[in-house]
Every structure is written in structure tokens, then in C-alpha cells.
Image (spheres, coloured by chain):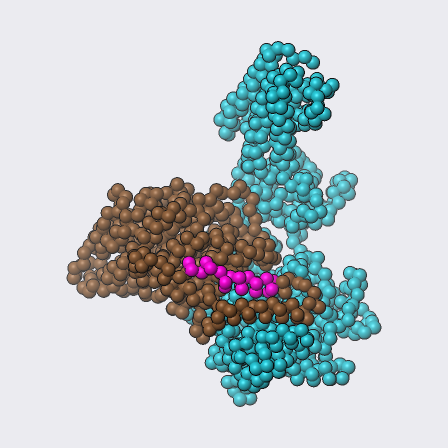
Amino acid sequence: MNYNWRRREFLKKTSAATMAAMAAGVPMSGLLSSCSTKEKIKSTADTVILLYMAGGMAHTETFDPKKYTPFRKGMESKEVLSTFDAVPTALDGISFSEGLENIGQVMDKGTLIRSYVAADLGHILHTRHQYHWHTCYEPPQSVTVPHMGSWMAKELGPVNPVIPPFINIGQRFTVGEGEELKAFHSAGFLGSEYGPFLIPDPTSGLDSVRPPVGMSNKRFEARNQLYERLVQESAMGEFGSDYQKESLKRSMEQAYMLLNSPEAKAFDLSQEPKEKYDTYNTGKFGLGCLMAKRLVDQGARFISVTSEYEPFMGWDTHENGHTRLKDMKKLIDAPIAQLIKDLDESGKLDRTMVIVASEFSRDMLTEGRPGAKVKDQVEVPDIIQDMKNYGMHRHFTDGCSVLMFGGGIKRGHVYGKTADERPCKSIEKPIKIAALHQTIYHALGIDPETNYEIEKRPFYTTPDGDGVAEMDLLA
Amino acid sequence: MKYKSTAIFWVTAVLLLCVGLGDGLLAAGLQEQAEGTEPFWLWKFLGRLHPLAVHFPVSLLLFAALLELFTLKNFNHKLRPGIDLLVWAGVAGAVLAASLGWILATVEDYGGSTLDVHQWTGIATAIIGLLLIYFLRKTEGGRNPKSVKAFRSVLFVSAIGVSVAGHFGASLTHGEDYLTSTFPWNEDSYSPENLNIDLVAFGEEGELSEQKQVELVGKVRAVLAHNCYKCHSDAKIKGELRLDEREYVFEGGESGPVIVPGSSGKSELVRRINLPKDHEEAMPSKGKVLSGDEIALISFWIDRGAPWPDAASEVSEYRVAALEPRRPNVPAARKGLDQPIDIWVDEYFQEQDMSWKDPVDDRTYLRRIYLDIIGLQPDPETYKAFEEDTRPDKRAAWVEALLNRNDDYATHWMTFWNDALRNDYTGTGYITKGRFAITDWLYTSLRENKPYDQFVKQLLNPDEKSKGFIEGIRWRGDVNASQVTEMQAAQNVGQVILGLNLKCASCHDSFISDWKLEEAYAFANIFADTTLEVSRCETPIGKKASTKILWEELGEIDSTANRDKKLEQLAEYLVQPANGRMYRTIVNRVWKQLMGRGLVEPADEMDNVPWSQDLLDWMATDFEDNGYDLKNLIYKIATSQAYQQPAVAIEDPQILTDDDFVFEGVVTKRLTAEQFADGVSQNIHPLFEMEELQYNPNELAVSEQSTMTFARASLVANNDFLKALGRPNREVVSTNRDSQASLLQALELTNGETLNEALQEGALRWKEKYGDGDIIVHETYRQLLGREPHQNEFNVAMEVLGEDPEPAAIQDFFWAVLLLPEFQLIY
């Protein structure tokens, strides 16, 4: 069976928005009860945009360049630290890898983290690390765990009632490991109302908000009227009122309202002036950034734009690392920089946090982490004869770069450091996922002790509620 | 009293200010010194005078303001001198109280937003008080009307100020909901343990007998377990304090002992639980504060020397359901009720002072048994045949006939068992060969109506076809110790088969039950090739557990045997009749499937109290007596009078999980995703192609072939349509479907392609088959709702359809009828 995620998922996701906004007081499952005791944190952000570099983005080839070792036949692979030259950025003494000049120029508006350390999950599987990155919990878990976007949707609701609070742009689920990807694109125990609204392809985002294929608006309205009249005439009245009937009726009304909403134009990229459209249009990812900008303008809560994970594609370079990274940088450099500039100019950056991150980094030699090396997945010859072997082909977890902008994040700040010599691991201020998540939640004003009791155990936004916000990232 | 000279005013004002500032400076000094060292006793003493002192300004200023109202017409009312005196005394009191308050806040570690509000309103009021005196002076006995106005305004402001400050102060001392919690509508959702202990009676006894001591400490431990273990037990050890075992309780935490036997007043624990919620040191720091009864209990226990005899360790803090079966004697049959189920329900109704209602009519009953037993809706001919059947026992006969439709029965119950056994056709794990489907085995077992003991045995001691349940899902890479496949097996067998939550205990000693980490590991070891190393909260503790069944009385597992042997033993031991718990668990689940709510809820927590222990115990043993026959169990429930009671429409889903739920009859249920899909496929147009079947009973060996006429939803892979309607992602066990509609579902139904396309196709087919609008209206109502349309319904439909309807109009009409609650609910 073919998955028609786009339409269906859109509809689902839209529901989250309205549920929270229109139907305050709709009872959630009886097992859920939020507990929060402390004073409210003052928020510095309303919206989060996650720009996800799926597949493992090598830090030494992007935001943390090391010594440039140009390709030559017969070079030793252990010589290779960076396969690109370094270029200056807006920050004194801070360089990026060649091809990221545009992002380099907006770094005065945000913070560069060079010391993110991913978890040790043994023999590397991208989707497990991605699950961990997005939920803060290591899979598997004995209950289904919510995506960070679902926590935001649940705790904060939509910014604009008709823009779904959790929108996920750019990931198809028909690719390899699709089932594993579905496992964390989920609201888990928070309930499907808070799940992601999926737009696998930003160029056809609008298709999702129209009445069913082949149905005019007029007919759509007439159908709804017929339904309402039949409900009125239905003999069901004799069975008395109950929550199931009420909830059915209410949700039908909401569905109808939603599909008639004008805000849908946020999903329509063709409304953007051509020049701007072209700046962003480096491909699906760039257009995803553009859609994110448009959605923020309409009032969005959490948007994830991914370069899309597909095994051995995108950032997941098992060969030809150098060559392919040129393309990947072209894909992201202009739109990310433009997004930051546009948000900054409109003033939205003040309350919108943008994060650029990846599940882990890559290296020429080390698989896993120094000292916790795991099973190699790529043959790396000692002597490089062929260009295809030139690049970062193994998965490295001990030093990754993360960019953060806006929403209370320090401007022009650099956090942490990796060693200049292999294994180029984090040597200053290593930071892990729980701290990163909690920093984001803190900026949004979500209490670190937010939790739900599931099967009599409290589940927090970070495991055991132990995540501590890294205040050094916040202005 | 006369107030001639400004000098008096200024002298007083300066004096008051000096007292205030002096105290403030003093307090500021104290603050620095207070870090670490105990403050000087005098400051503590003065600080604690604050709650006493505050009453003066509050009452004096309020009373002054009240009396002032009488002087509005004539400033020099005879009350004037009295008012002035009240004002002077009130302001003096306010300044004094504010100063003492400052000291108190400094030396005693208060904190929080309530304190801030209280502190600053208090201080502001004291300052406004000085202003008040100033204006009073300027009124010049009423000759200066401007100042009179100002004086009065300030007076009322300060009256409000002291009230507000007083209110927040009281909130600090007594808790914010001290007053409001007494309102009947503000009843707290958290109910403190039902302590069920008469402290007065205990107090009258001299020396407590050992038995009394055990009882007393048992209650204390229950309070500790439910309120403190989350941070102070094996699981999480905050402040180096554990409260889950005797030695730790008396050992105390990082700041020393928390309990001084014989003196609750000197016990840190008692001090902390008595602190106001906002206080930094208040305990519990998360969640609800303890109730007065709970505090009284703990204080009493400590004052009586905190007895904790050895025997007390045997007593559970939690309700534990009996393991063994129980065979209650069925009371005598009574008029009209000969089924034991009904006799037990009748007993229950009598206790509850309730009476039987008339059973539902034939149409409702038929639809109910069809959907509950085979997951399909009766067609119009079937309704007719049933209504025309004149046999007195026709309901039982039809239930039996439905149960004999083996393939339809199996297909329907696949939904329930796939959820529970975490079996699916697609999902995580298959890609790395870390997961195995049991579909074939499951379908066959259901179709054969395999006795439940055999069913469980084959799941626990499996062959290739049934191994998927205990093999769990194996992810590539390293997983948490509590999620290795052996532990998954222990958890899932616990939850599904035994109605037991082992998830907590697989990481640390549980704080919701008595199960210990080592017991969980001992159970998991049965599923392991080797012996697992015990990890507590992901940290190996360098220890291996033994290999044991959770209840040793069921039998001893040979820990030296290989896995196959251990599983064989486990299977034999667990299915014994002595394991009454397992059979209570399954009868409760089946009851819940048919009745909408279990005798015990949640159905995964069989230690909870059933609404009728007798009925539960009887059904479990009757199930055993009848060869663990699931169909027989369903037959008994479906033919009971209890099942035939009119459906109860619940106003709030919360009611279903409440402890004090009262059984009245079947609870209205929503169609599952599969029932809804099959209803559409059956009558309008198949939602899924036959090729989409992940398991096709039509293609089995000839002798076993079924004749499924459309692809039933329980046998296709999960998809967006089914997911939106509630089919779970089966990575983890799922024993409950949400019966509430959500916007999510409404949207899928409104705009989803799957339904839209099926209705479109169906409309064409119907147009061809029936042609005329009136026939289509009649047939739609007959086939989808099992009845003729009422005149009004007919008229509304005909307005849209007309005599010669377009397929589009038919399609929209289908849609509207499918979404009627009457179609969507099982009532």
C-alpha cells in the first residue's frame, strides 16, 4: 500500500492546532496529569525552527574546520583532517569550512556550539540516534515517547490556532528505515493530537488543505450541511448524550472550520516574490526553510525542516565524502543564512529560535567514539588512491557542531571546543542532548519538571527530569 | 487626644523609621552571616514574633477604615479621636511587623513568589502608613479638605494593603489552598492514602503490641512510598536519603538523621513535611503536600519511638491481589436469572441498591453481538431473520452461531491480540531482522479456539511460529539494560499475561509495587541464554540475580538449565490452575472487550480492586473448569442478562478508570478503526484491495480456506486511515484503544483519500444497482444502520438526492450517514 502521508498527515496535524486552541477543556486520556510546582520561567522564545542535518554532518567539514589536507593520490588516510580549506566568518578568529560563507556571515547573530557529544548507542544506526536526538530518550523504550515538537505542542499549544503547532517538513517515510523514522515522528503517550503535521515535499504543501480531490468548496459545504441535518434528525437522540457523541460532533465541526481557513496560504510558496523564492530555492531543503519563514510569519510553534534522511544519501556519506559535501553545503548555505537574515530583519528572530544540528558527526577513521569504538561500517584504505575514498565516511559521536540563533540565544558567541588533532573530540564544555533540550524548553518557558504519569511512572521532558538548561547559551 | 505639634509627628515618624531601618540593616547583616552558621537565637525569636505582631496592624487599620466610613459626612464625628488612635497604633504595628517579618524571612529560609508578594506589600504598607500619619497631621482637624481626602484615600489603601499582605502571609503559613480547599467543589484530585487507622485508639494503648507496631509502621511506609519514594528510594536518592528500608530511614541523609525516635519535634523529617509548600526546604518538594492525617500519623509513630519490628518488613505497602484461585459459592438462582454471572451481578446490584432494567431490543442486541464477536454488522436480511426467529433461546443460539464462524471470529479478534501481543505486519525491527511476526500462529490459534492455557504455553515456550512475542524487538547497537529483549519479555509477559507492571522494577526497586529489581531480573533470566548482569538505572551493580518465577510457590526454575528448558518450566508453571491471577487477567480482559470496562481497571493492573471480587473469581475458575475455552467465556458473557442491559453512555471517560466506578451494564463503545473500515467495505465499497492483505486466510490449504469477500482491516498493514482511527503503533504492548473521537480522526474521515475514494466507487456501484433516490435512501439506512429511515430523515436525504441522484450526491449521503453517532458507536 502506498502511503499518502501528505494529505492525511496534514489533516492530523492541523487537528493539534485546533484542539489546543478551540477545544480547551477536551479531556485527554485519564492517565495523563501534568504536574508543575515551581515558579514559571520567563520565556525568551515562542517559536522553534529546527534545521536538521540528517545522516551525520562532519564537524571538521562544516562548522569546525581543522587542518586542510588537499587530495593527492597516495596520501595516508590518517593525514586527512579536513578536506576543505577554511574561510573566515563574521566572528573574529572563527572559521568555517569553505562553502559555508553565507552562514559564516550571520554568525554574529547566534551561537556556535562546537562540543555537542552524542550518546553511545553501540553499533551505529542513524535512526536510533535520530530518535534519541528528537525525543531525548534512547530507543527502545517501554512506552512510546514524544518528539520534542509534541512536547511543545502539548505544553504551549499553537501560536496561531490554525497553524499546526508541530510541523515537519521534508521527510518521506517510504525510504529505507521508514518504520524506524515513524517511531519518533510521534506524539507518543501525549496522544496523536500532538503529533507532527508532515509535509514531505514543501512544493506541494498546499494540496493538503483543500477539500477532497474532485470536490468543490460548494459541494463540500453542502455535504457538511447534510451531515448536520441528519444528526439532528437522527434517532440517536433517544440514547442520551455522552462524550463520544459530543466529541464526534465537535471534531466534525472543527474539521469543517479548519478546511475553510484562509491561513492555508502560508503553505503556498508560489505567493513568495520570485527573487526571494530563488534565493531560498537550493532544493527541497531550501524551500523548506522558506516555508518555515512563511509559517513563522503566520504564527507557528515548532517547525522541523530536514535535509531528509535516506540511508547513504545526503549527509550520510559512506563514500565520495568530499565531493558530496560540496553539494550538501550548496543545499544549506544560502537558505539558512537567508532565513536568519529575514527573521532578523522582520524582528521575528527575537522570539524565534533556530537550531542547526545533526545526530552525530563523521570522521575519516574513528567509528563511534575514541575509547568506545564500535563495529566499522565502512572500509577505509590506509592509502588513498581514489577520490571516492577522500572524505569523512565513518560515524563519529564525540564532537559535533550545533548552531543556535535567536529566541534568547547569545549573539556572536562560541561555546566549547574540539581538539585540533585527531580524534578531534570535544575538549571543552562537552554538552549533551538533555542539556540542549532543556535549554530549548527553558527559552520557551517550559518547566524542567513538566511530566506525565504513564503507567504510574513519571515521564519528564528529559529523562528523569534531570536535564539542566545551559545558561551560558542564553543571553 | 490632641495632636498640636508637628514635632510629635516627626519624632514618631523618625523613631519608627529607625526601628524599621535598623532591623533591616541588621537583617541584611544576618543574611551574610546566616550562610552556614546558625543565626543568633534572639533574631530567631524576634522573627518568630512576626506572625503574632501582624495581627495588630491588620485589625487596627481595617477597623480604622471601617469607622472612617461613619465620618464621611462629618470629619469631626465623635469617633474621630478613636480613629486617629487606631491609625497611630496601626501604623506603628505595621512598621514593627514589617521589620520582624524581614528578620524572619532572613533567618528562616523562606522563599518563592508568595513570599515576595507578601514581603513587598508588607513593606509598602508600612511606608504608606507613615504617609497616612503625615496626612492625618495635615487635616488640621478637618479644616483642610484636600488633606482629608488624601488621608481617607491613603487609609483605605493601607487597609487593603495590610489585608493583601496578611492574606499572602497566611498562604505562606497555611498553604495557598488552606481556605479554598474546604469548598466541596475544590476537592483535590489526589486522595491521600485512606489511612484507615484510629490514632486515638492507638494512643490509648500503653505499650504497643508487636502486631500493632507492624500495623502502624505499615501505614507509615505506605505514606512514605506514595509520597517520598520518587526521590528517596532505590530509584533516586536525593540528598543521600532513602526512605524505603528500615536501616536507611534511621540512617538519615546528607544532613544527618531525619528521625529522632520519641520526638517528632526534633525530627527533621517532621519539620520538613510541616513546612509551607513554597518553603525551599518543604517536602515533598515535588507534588502534593502531605495531608494533615498523614502528618499526624508520622508524628505519632515517631513519638511512640518509631517502632519498626522485623515482622513489619513482611507487610506490603501496596494492595496485592491473591495469586491462588478462589471459588466463591454461587448463591441460589433467582427469578429470571439462572446464569451465575447474572446472579453475581444481582448480588452486586442489591449491594448498590440498584435494579435491573429491561434488556435491549433484538435489533440492538444483534448489532452488539455481531460487532463484539465477529467485528461485522448484520445485514438487513439477518436483522429480519433474527426478529422473526421465535425460539425463546434465540439470543443464545445466535451467539453460538456467530462464535462458530471461525474465520470471522479469528479475524475480528486479531485486532485485540495483535495490539496486546505487539504483533504487526510492518514496523520497527523487521528491517534488521530483529523482530518476528506471529500472525500465522495467532490466526490459527484463534480459529481453532486453542485453549488459553495452551495458547499461553506456546507463547512462552514457543516454536518458530510463535516466538515473536517473547523475542521482543531487537534494535541494532546497544540498548538500555532495562530494554534488552529478555527484559522486554519479562515486562510484556508481566503486563499482558499476568496483569502486572514490571517496567519500574526492571530498572530499580519499584516504587509503585513491592517488586524488586532482583526479582525482575530473576524473572527475565528465564528468557535468557545466560544470566543477565543486574543493572540499576543503567549502571551495572556487579551482581547477578537468580532465576525465578515471580511467585516461587508456582514452581522452581532450574537455573542451570538451558533456555529451552527454562521456558518449558516457566510455561508449565504459569498455566497451572494455582496461578489464579493469570486467569483473572484474561477473563477480565475479555469482559472488558465486551462490556467496555473491566471488572478491574486498568486491565493491566490486576492488583487493583475489582468492582465484584466474587464475579471475577467465579469467572476465572469457571474458565478453568471449562477447559480454558475463550469462546465459552465469550458465550457466557454475551448471553448474560448483564450484557443485555441497555448501554450506558458515559459523560466523562475519566469515570471508566475511577475506583468508585459503578457497574450498570455495557458501556457505549466506539467502533474500532477495523470495525469502522469493515463496515464501509462490507456495505459500500472495499477500502482495501485483496492484495493488501498481509495474511490471507483465503489462500490457506484447501481444507482451511476461508471465504473472505473483502480485505478485512485487521489483516492489512497499518496505514494512515487506520492509524488516525486509533490503530496503535505496535512497538509496545497496547491494551486499550481511545474511545473518544478526535479532530484528527474527523479530519481523516472528512478529507482522507482512502475513505473518499471508496465512497466514490461505491456511489457508482449503488447508482447502477439501485438507481432511484428513494431506494438508495432506504437501502443506505437499512444496510448501514439496520433500520428504515424516519420520515424526516428520508425527506432531508431526498432533498439532496432527488429522484435520479448523481453519484456525487450518493457519495456525500454515504459520508453523512457513516459519520452519524448511530453508525460510529456500539450501543
Which percent across, then down, holds residue A22? 55, 56
Q: Colour of chain B?
A: cyan
Residue B206 figure quarter: top right
- Quarter of the image with the C terminus of chain A is top left
Say which residue appears at 55% left-offset and 88% top-offset: B703
Residue A170 figure quarter: bottom left
Direction bottom: furthest residue = B702
Say which residue appears at 56% left-offset and 77% top-offset: B810
Which is nearer the eye, B689 or B804?
Answer: B804
Which is nearer the eye, A258 or B468?
Answer: A258
Residues in magenta, as a range: A247-266
Task: State left or right for residue A36 relative to residue A282.
Answer: right
Which percent across, then down, holds residue A304? 41, 57
Q: Of helix, strand and loop, which mostly describes the magenta segment? A: helix
Say which residue appears at 35% left-offset and 66% top-offset: A311
Indicate yes or no whether the magenta region holds residue A265: yes
Indicate yes or no whether the magenta region holds residue B341: no
Which is nearer the eye, B732 or A350?
Answer: A350
Which percent across, then down, holds residue B140? 63, 15
Above or below, A230 against B392 in this view is above
Q: Which chain is brown?
A: A
Which is nearer the eye, B402 or B207?
Answer: B402
- Quarter of the image with the N terminus of chain A is bottom left
Task: State left or right for residue A14 relative to residue B199.
Answer: left
